[in-house]
Amino acid sequence: MGRLARKRNHNNKREIYRKSRTRNYRRDLDQIHDDVKPENAAKLNAQDIDTDLPGMAQHYCVECARYFINQEAMDVHTKGKLHKRRIKQLKEEPYTQAEADAAAGISKADNGKPGGRALVGMDVEMTE
């Protein structure tokens, strides 16, 4: 009976822990979407030498936000499934805050037409 109780309490806790940790956190798609723009991509591809980064920051994949130690490793990466999947995900425009508010049913306040009240020029008759 003791063995069964221990076996039933496992519940894949190891996998949950691996998914929740942030040690190997990658940049999100909306952050990378800004980097893919031509003016930002040129800066990222022409980085200064940094000895702390792999390959001294000379081999950088902008779409995946990853550094590689040499050009051969980067070529293998660009031919791979993960890189192609990331490019496909980046073709879609990221959601904006306005789209999220519209989906939730929240919109800007309607304060009427600009220029004052609508009933200023009209006569209002009241009946008893």
Image (cartoon, rainbow, N blue to C red):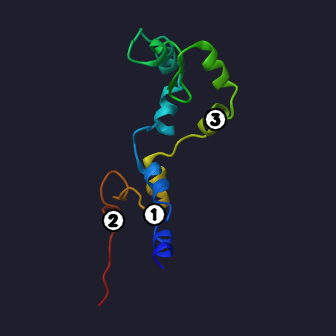
Q: Amino acid at mark 3?
A: Leu
Q: Is residue 65 above or below residue 48?
A: below
Q: Position of residue 116 (x, y in %)?
A: 30, 55
Q: Which residue carries the number 1 mark?
A: 105
For label 3, the SS is helix
Residue 90: name its quadrant: top right
Q: From the viewer's side, name the closer residue of 86 and 33.
A: 86
Q: Which residue carries the number 3 mark?
A: 82
Q: Amino acid at mark 1?
A: Gly
| Residue neighbourhood size for the residue with mark 2, other residues' Cα within 10 Å, grouped as few (<14), some (14–19), many (≥20) | few
2 and 1 marks in contact (CB < 8 Å)? no
| Residue neighbourhood size for the residue with mark 3, other residues' Cα within 10 Å, grouped as few (<14), some (14–19), many (≥20) | few
Q: Position of residue 41 (x, y in %)?
A: 51, 19
**Which mark is on residue 119?**
2
For label 1, the SS is loop
50 with respect to 78 (left or right): left
Who comes first in sequence, dot 2 or dot 3?
3
Q: From the viewer's side, name the closer residue of 79 and 108.
A: 79
61 with respect to 101 (left or right): right
Which residue is located at x 49 percent, y 26 percent?
Answer: 35
Which of label 1 and label 3 is nearer to you? 3
For label 2, the SS is loop
Q: Position of residue 97 (x, y in %)?
A: 43, 48
Who comes first in sequence, dot 2 or dot 1?
1
Q: Position of residue 105 (x, y in %)?
A: 45, 63
Point out the residue furthest to the top here. 49
C-alpha gap between disc 2 and disc 3: 62 Å
Q: From the viewer's side, name the closer residue of 107 and 40.
A: 40
Who comes first in sequence, dot 1 or dot 3?
3
41 with respect to 123 (left or right): right
Which of label 2 and label 1 is nearer to you? 1
Q: Amino acid at mark 2?
A: Leu
